[in-house]
Amino acid sequence: MRYSSLAEFMGSADKTLAKSPVGVIFAEDSVELDTTLRHHLGCGFKQLLFFSPKEYSIDPALEDQIHRIDYDVLADDPLTVSLNSLIEAAPKIWFYYCYNAEYLFHPFCEHRNISEMITWNTEERRNTILTYVVDLYAGDLDQHPDAVSIDDAYLDKSGYYALARQDKNNHNHPKERQLDFYGGLRWRFEEHIPAPRRKIDRVAIFKAKPGLKLLPDHTFNDEEYNTFSCPWHHNITASICSFRTAKALKRNPGSTFDIHTFKWHNSARFEWHSQQLLDLGLMEPGQWF
């Protein structure tokens, strides 16, 4: 179904957002729209919302499987504004969000769907699932100058690290169970990435509740939502495999001419399988086996 605006969609949101989980995809450009939608349709979401400029075209076969919302992606902070509207409209519903050319993987996703993972996480008394944004990039930039290729995708197999997240109100004590994670292209090409955008952690899977607000840095106004695990053991995490940074680095005039290849000695071909991400430590099953 298609809506001409977020306001029109909100008129029927009580029915559309009645069951968890709901996936939300934002189209920043027209790159890999169909593959992004097909991938997430296969994840097991009850509903899939697609925010996109009206001029972007997708496979007509996908139109009947999603809720398409015409949206100005160049507006001021469009993702935060729209997601916070959804949170307010559907408290108690689980949401996931990403951009186009990003692909969700979670432990055992080849035979367990997103609903099963969320059910497990709920039993663990957790309202969030932390995700790591794992940069993907084309191996041959001569063949793929926009750095995007599903068939020639690579990722970094090392170079990831975490730092304590400092409390702005108490510089002597870092925040409890919160870390800032770094790595991938944002780490290797950090001179081209503004400091606030270098982190790769994103709380992309979460349960809405009254008063909850998503902030522009992909954290929430509830500090417990920003933690990577509960106090008693590690929890399940997931990965969002993303061409977004590679696209930006090759599109930006300030960086594109400095980058002739993204490949280095720690590059590995992406296998499009959760086991590779588990083996590399880019997500973990927690107690879910």
Image (tube, rainbow, N blue to C red):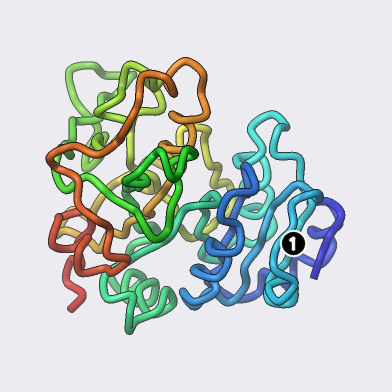
Q: Is residue 208 above or below residue 211?
A: below
Q: Is residue 86 above or below residue 252?
A: below
In the rendered image, is residue 221 in sight? no
In screen coordinates, is 265 left or right of 204? left
In screen coordinates, is 131 left or right of 2? left
Q: Residue at x 66, y 52 (%)?
A: 88
Q: Position of residue 19 (x, y in %)?
A: 60, 76
Q: Quadrant of residue 206?
A: bottom left
Q: Quadrant of residue 121?
A: bottom left
Q: Position of residue 210 (x, y in %)?
A: 59, 53
- The N terminus lies in quadrant: bottom right
Residue picked out by circle 1: 68
In screen coordinates, is 82 left or right of 180? right
- How many marks do you count on the picture? 1
Q: Residue at x 54, y 64 (%)?
A: 35
Q: Is residue 253 above or below residue 264?
A: above
- The C terminus lies in quadrant: bottom left
Q: Quadrant of residue 230?
A: bottom left
**Camera-side residue of 47 and 39:** 39
Q: Is residue 182 above or below residue 55?
A: above
Q: Residue at x 33, y 33 (%)?
A: 199
Q: Position of residue 138 (x, y in %)?
A: 37, 46
Q: Amino acid at mark 1?
A: Arg
- Are there few (<14), some (14-19), or many (20+) residues within 10 Å of tag 1? many
Q: Secondary structure at mark 1?
A: strand
**Camera-side residue of 21 and 166:** 21
